[in-house]
Amino acid sequence: MSLDDLGAPPGARAAPDGGFWLEHPGGEPWLAVMQRGPNVVLSTSYSNRRFVRNFVDAFDLAQQLASHVSARVFEEVSGTEVSPSQLDALLSPFGRYVQRQAATFQQTERRIQAEGMARLEYPLGPLDLVGEYFAFGVVGADAATPDAVAAALARGLEARRVHRASSTAFDVRARDTRRTSGRAPDPATKVLCRPDGAVQVWPTWAHPFSELASVTLEVARHLATSLDADLVLGGRSVDAAYLAEIAARSGGLGVDFYRWITG
């Protein structure tokens, strides 16, 4: 069985490591379809915010593709065949398999917060979780004290909700936090006053990349201007041309930005 047998469906996008990427019917990133030896593999990213939905729905797609070319479907981790009649039992929300996958996803979520990792909406080969790639440094300010940063955040960001999480750390929320649906949204951007005098600005990864990138970039630029400091991303000083390219490229997927910034 090969990708040539299947053909890329309408709307599919060529993946950088071969095969193609598919969007979920709702329009969000879904999965990669790759050729591995004689097999076609459907792979979802554990760090995608909708991972549980994505892997469950991937089985339906796999069965559709298999029936189209008279192939069989296997669950890759255990190597066991999954027939159409077994799908409901395998994908029971409270079954062992789904619970194990959900636990792995939760472990990934904890790593993002505890280890400074970042999401990829689609896997890049074996990678579906990478080091932080959208962390700005605000450097060179004469007086970037926590109180000075607090004062700067309090001016000029009226559309944002700023919360002082500790003596040296702040959260900036992505949108108005007035409760309209029972709970406030998660913070989109973190700000940390580091011991070396620099200020670090990076996303919490609780939102889609384009949304959190917009807020993070806004906060980083605002602090650099307010503190009369330089802005750095990826070890490179952010001049006007670099800033324009960052802004343009951060309006899409994080996986694309990651490939650009690390390429």
Image: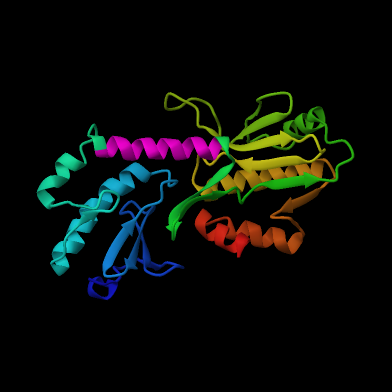
Looking at the figure, which quarter contains the C terminus?
bottom right
Please count the marks in the image: 0
- 253 sits to left or right of 31: right
Q: Residue at point 22% right, 34% down?
A: 95
Colour option used: rainbow
Magenta stretch, main secondary structure, is helix
Q: Is residue 136 magenta?
A: no
Q: Is residue 158 visible?
A: yes
Picture quadrant where residue 9 is located? bottom left
Which quadrant is home to the N terminus? bottom left
In the rendered structure, the answer to whether residue 249 lies left or right of residue 185 reads right
User: Residue 179 placed where, x, y %?
Assistant: 48, 25
Q: Nearer the viewer, residue 115 or 78?
A: 78
Where's residue 134, x and y in %? 62, 50
Q: Residue at x 83, y 31 (%)?
A: 145
- The foreground one among 13 and 79 is 79
User: Where is residue 125, by image quadrant?
Assistant: bottom left
Is 70 situated above or below 173?
below
Residue nearest the viewer, comparing 214 with 71: 71
| Snapshot quadrant of residue 188 | top right
As drawn, the residue found furthest toward the bottom would be: 4
Which region of the structure is painted magenta? 97-113
- Percent of width and height locating residue 250: 58, 55
Looking at the image, residue 11 sits to the left or right of residue 222; the answer is left
Q: Can residue 253 be seen in this view?
A: no
Answer whether residue 108 is magenta in the image: yes
User: Vertically, is 162 above or below 261?
Assistant: above
Residue 185 is situated, as x and y percent measured from the top left of the image, at 50, 32
